Amino acid sequence: MERQQTRSEEAAPGLIAGFGGLAKSAFALLMSRVELAALEMGEVRNNIARLLLVGALGIVALWFALGCWTALIIVLAWDALGWKILLIVAAAYSLLALGILLYARAMLDSDQLSMPATMTELRKDRDALL
């Protein structure tokens, strides 16, 4: 009789063993999600660093170009327009700045700095658990 009872205990894991397996699986799932998030954060960090470097170089080049072109336009048009050329140049630069601001907002709205794969997996996990 004892031999038969021992076999049935070996064949069917206990409640604690089941919870242990569940905890082990949940921990493994959590670790895989953390690893995926870490990989995507590294990619996002690299993209942000590259964007900042290119943006800084672009801004420096733009300042030099704007300064030279502005000086040339003002010198050439001063005899004909006088102080009005300064107003025209200021208005043009204001419109340019507004366009750049709208473009930057569009870049941020397109979620280029998000982590789509991680968020998708986390949504799937949430739906599976509910």
Image (cartoon, rainbow, N blue to C red):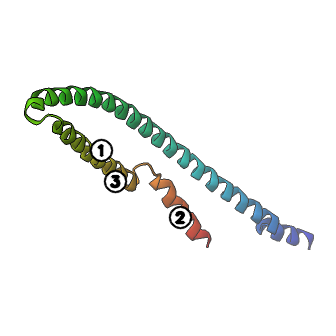
- In the rendered image of this protein, does residue 23 appear above or below residue 86? below
How far across and down, in percent of the image, does residue 11 sit?
77, 67
Relative placement, left or right, of 48 versus 65 is: right
Q: Residue at x 33, y 48 (%)?
A: 101
How far across and down, in percent of the image, does residue 109 sit?
38, 56
Viewer-proximal residue among 17 and 100: 100
Q: Which mark is residue 106?
A: 3
- In the rendered image of this protein, does residue 6 appear above or below residue 116? below
Cβ–Cβ under 8 Å for marks 2 and 3: no
Separation of disc 2 and disc 3 at Cα?
A: 26 Å
Give whichever of discs 1 and 2 has the lower sequence position: 1
Q: Nearer the viewer, mark 2 or mark 3?
A: 3
How far across and down, in percent of the image, does residue 115 sit?
47, 52
Q: Nearer the viewer, mark 1 or mark 2?
A: 1
Q: Amino acid at mark 2?
A: Arg
Cβ–Cβ under 8 Å for marks 1 and 2: no
Separation of disc 3 and disc 1 at Cα?
A: 14 Å
Which secondary structure, mark 2? helix
Q: Which mark is residue 123?
A: 2
Q: Which mark is residue 105?
A: none
Which secondary structure, mark 3? helix
Q: Amino acid at mark 1?
A: Ala
Indicate the quadrant where residue 9 lies. Answer: bottom right
Relative placement, left or right, of 79 versus 59 is: left
Q: Residue at x 19, y 27 (%)?
A: 71
Q: Which residue is mark 1?
A: 97
- In the rendered image of this protein, does residue 13 appear above or below residue 44? below
Extreme right residue here?
A: 2
